[in-house]
Image (spheres, grey):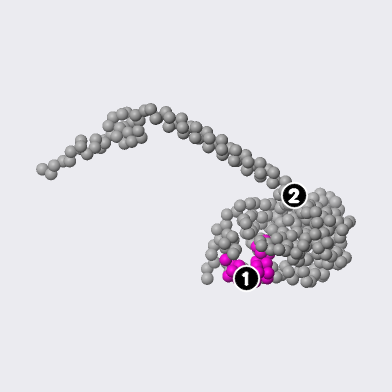
Amino acid sequence: MAKTRKHLRVQERHIYNPEIDACPHCGEPLQARGHYQWRKTVQQLDKVVYVASRGKECVNQQCQHQGQVYTSAAASMVTVPECTYGLDVIVQIGWWRDKEHLNRQQIHARLRGQGVQISEREVDHLYARYQVLMACAERLEVEQLEAIVAKQAGLIISIDGLEPEGASEQLWVVREVQAEVVLVVAWLPRVNYQTLGALLEPVVDLGLPILATVSDKQGCVRKALHERLPDVPHQWCQSHYLGNGTKPIYERDGALKTELRQKIRQEIRQSMGEVLSDFSGSDFSPSDFNRRGVDGSRAPGAGGAANHTEPSGQ
């Protein structure tokens, strides 16, 4: 069966840079790479976005980790590798399937109703990805994490939450940024620094070195990280920071557009009123162009039926 081609209109474009600017090993500034680590168009529940992740690397020749590439934690929270659907879509499918017990056809109908272009088979594939995410809550691959530490000298941890539509709980994800490895996933009915601290506990108990943490500026997240990892440097997520910073600009821009639209419409009404008033006292009619030429002479064939004589058949 032939695949149905998607017709996606990108509504937003985001280019993510690493949240850290200096090498966590030597402290020297990181240098941006000349190409993207990855880029793709991603369908989310409410929009279609173009996402690109640009990496940075350490160029200090004296550093043992010269050439190591650092990527954005925020970019990894948009979607999972080798997938063109947002993490919010995957989590929403998991909620509907596990919590509301909807079948594939019902989930597919809901997503299509929200404008998501997806097939029923893809719903199954995304639910399988959701199950993989949830499996991380039950088992940590210690050997894999030790290999990451051996290569990078430590872990860089990010923590973020997602709240599906109609859900009474939030899905929180803890991951290792550089290797894009999910460490812990859990549904939290209550989100506070105690529950988030408990979520971080399995990672902290591993005893592996943690170079830095990344999160948004939510108060309970800050307190949980401060209590569980007090000596680890922390970086605010640039995506959330810039998004919050641009909100006043968007609001002002919207107000300015409304003001300009009102002024332009008012001027158009005034101009149209002047044009109509100029012609109101004249005998001119646009239909005159159908009967007279530009020089005022009668146009050919405009004499009407009374002045037109058909040739006789004789």
Measuring 31% from the left and 36% from the top, which residue is drawn there?
Answer: 290
Q: Nearer the viewer, residue 236 or 24?
A: 236
Residue 97 lies in the magenta-colored region: yes
Q: On residue 116, which mark appears?
A: none
Q: Give the crowd class for mark 2: few <14, some 14-19, many >=20 residues within 10 Å.
A: few
Q: On residue 102, which mark appears?
A: 1
Q: CA distance from mark 2 to mark 1?
A: 36 Å
296 horizontally vs 153: left or right: left
Give the main secondary structure, helix, strand or loop, of the magenta stretch.
helix
Q: Position of residue 288 (x, y in %)?
A: 32, 33
Task: Residue 1: tell me if it is visible.
Answer: yes
**Magenta-colored span:** 87-109
Whether residue 102 is situated above or below residue 152 in the rendered picture: below
Whether residue 129 is situated above or below residue 159 in the rendered picture: below
Q: Position of residue 147 (x, y in %)?
A: 82, 66
Whether residue 9 is situated above or below residue 3 in the rendered picture: above
Measuring 56% from the left and 39% from the top, which residue is drawn there?
Answer: 261
Q: Residue furthest left?
A: 314
Q: Nearer the viewer, residue 259 or 137?
A: 259
Measuring 64% from the left and 54% from the top, which residue is drawn there?
Answer: 50
Please state which amino acid type lies under the numbered disc 2.
Answer: Tyr
Q: Quadrant of the C terminus?
A: top left
Residue identified by numbered label 2: 241
228 horizontally vs 102: left or right: right
Q: Secondary structure at mark 2?
A: helix
Measuring 66% from the left and 55% from the top, which residue is drawn there?
Answer: 51
Please state which amino acid type lies under the numbered disc 1.
Answer: Leu
